Amino acid sequence: MSEAEIINLIVLTFKSAVPLIFAALGELVVEKSGVLNLGVEGMMLIGAVAGFIGAVTTGSIFVGMLMAMAAAVLVSLIFAVLTLSLLANQVATGLALTIFGIGLSAFIGKPFLGNTIEGLQPWAIPLLSDIPILGPLLFNHDPMLYLAVAAFFGVSWFLYRSRGGLILRSIGESHEAAHALGYPVIRIRYLAVMFGAAMGGLGGAYLSLVLTPQWQEDMTAQRGWIALALVVFATWRPSRVMIGAWLFGALTIVNFYAQSQGVSFSSHLLATLPYFATIIVLVLISWDAAKIRLHAPAALGKPFHASD
Amino acid sequence: MRIKLEPRVAASKWMSYGSPAIAAVLTIFFGAILFASLGRDPVQGLYIFFIEPLTGLYELGELGLKATPLAIIAIGLAVGFRANVWNIGAEGQLVMGAICGGGVALAFHGQGGWWVLPLMIIAGAAGGMAWGAIPALLRTRFNANEILVSLMLTYAAVQILGWLVHGPWINPEGQNFPETRTFEEWALLPELIEGTRLNVSAIFALVVVFAGWIFMTRSFAGFKVNVVGQALDAAKYAGFSQNKVVWVSFLIGGGAAGLAGLIEVTGPIDQLNATFAPGYGFAAIIVAFLGRLHPVGILFASLLMALTFLGGESLQINMNMPKAVTGVFQGMLLFFVLATDVLIRYRIRVVSRTPAATGEAG
């Protein structure tokens, strides 16, 4: 393998990690507030289709990104109203959001099947991108990839260095205590769900605007679920989300590469690898039950009703 | 003025029957809005979606044919959902059941007899159970989240099916399509009503519903499942093992899904192919909730859900609308079922913004 080929594979790994980074960081914030939203896959699909429609009809990728976020936030509000205001079961409602998202995105995306756009182009950072090896590796990416890295720093800072993050985490640990201190539990959870949706929408939009600039039904291919697994894998810590996302990105690319090199192994069996890898990782991480209990938000998935 | 939820002293009996009906009515209402917003006639749209698939004996047979696997899977899942054990991978267990059951039919190709079909049924249920046992084992032994594990196994199962029908099990006399040989006469479920495709599996569904009713409401094991789901601390105090309940939930859920998968390939499809799995494993989750996790409710819910599948096809044929409209209706239905659930345990009150000013105490 030549040097250029290796660089190309690493760049592809970074790219394929971006949807996972957006979606998993978003879900991390949601879960830190004590809400389990299993609708990530559905919100990503809504983001992917809305982003693509936005980009096709206006000709602007940026408008597409905004529409992806807005649409994902809109459908996530259904989840928020049901689970936060009407106290519906979070697991079931999240699943409903995924089923609804798959159906709705296929439905509204139908007329746009087969359309193509010019995807988002790399944005070489002057001077830095001219450095040999490191330049093409780190400083010649599309703006959404830079945004994903910025989101990591933003989320880390917010959760652990800001007052808002402290309140959000305290709500995720004990909503009763936070409520007694006068924090608006439900309002903050609404905001967290909406933030998670906007991030999930961006993750979906990265697929339809950058990775494969077109709309296909079910184009997220279970990345929403992998993002949920990543949050557990990361034991609810943003830095580990990044590591996990890159590992999964690498796994996807290895699979692609093996097939392009004409490996005689069944492509179907190769395609099971990410799923089995997720299971193995989940087992390794969850083995120590005490560790999960220590890191998981204590109020995760529990409904809250203020008995004022 | 704002809306406030007031806990009821006891769960409303009336609402536990009424809320699914309210949810269905709301779904139809929003469905009408959906049609109108697309510039289609809402009355015609609803007619083609909900009524057209019911006009005729053949069509009613199709309804039963689709409702059968849905009811069987949903009964199995409801056992787990009652205990807060989330088996989301019924679709994978269904595929595995079809692979194992179908594998028996292929193994005895050209040398079968009456005994092949019972053997296939056993293999199908066992295959689903085995696939369901993996998340149960990983959850009880290693504390791994059963939602994610069972779901990942679903996509793995679909790929394994793809491998089999593209490779080792491909029809040697075929045109290289990703499908197996068609099953022989003795490996097919007998027809139940002439002039329809409905087969004896509909009777299996009724048996499973009845067995589910006995298990959930009349057996000690079913009682344990309910206690673990509703009051974990009480269950621990009574010495009911949570791990055992996880195992029971996944074995029953997996076995039911495996049976449904076998029924699907020995009934209408009569071979294994890469795309036979119709998403019943996911739809059955909606059926279980729509039926309020009660066997009789599930029976009715499976018929309504089957109708949404047929309605989607009917809209595609008659109004040239995308088949995905089925998923939209199913998602809406589940949203409304979950939303109206709140009416069972809470009363909705509209109160003024400043309770103190109205002189209302406490």
Image (cartoon, rainbow, N blue to C red):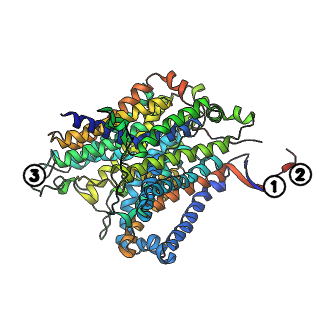
Amino acid type, label 1: Ser
Disc 2 residue crowd, few under 14, some 14–19, many 20+, Cα 10 Å: few
Relative to B285, residue A302 above or below: above
A274 on left or right of B327: left
User: Label 2, on which residue?
Assistant: B357
Can residue A103 be seen by looking at this rendering? no
The residue nearer to you, when weighing B361 against A243, is: A243
Name which residue type carries label 3: Pro
B66 and A300: which is toward the camera: A300
**Disc 1 versus disc 3: distance between alpha carbons?**
74 Å
Q: Nearer the viewer, residue B209 or B21?
A: B21
**Residue B141 horizontal/vertical position (percent):** 42, 25
Tell me if B243 is positioned left or right of B265 in this view: right
In the displayed structure, B136 sits above or below B215; it is: above
For the residues labelled 2 and 3, the Cα–Cα distance comes to 82 Å
Circle 2 or circle 3, nearest the eye? 2
Badge 2 vs badge 1, beta-carbon distance below 8 Å: yes
Callout 2: chain: B
Residues at marks 2 and 3, common chain? yes
Q: The residue tagged with tag 1: helix, strand or loop?
A: loop
Q: CA distance from mark 2 to mark 1?
A: 9 Å
Q: Nearer the viewer, mark 1 or mark 3?
A: 1
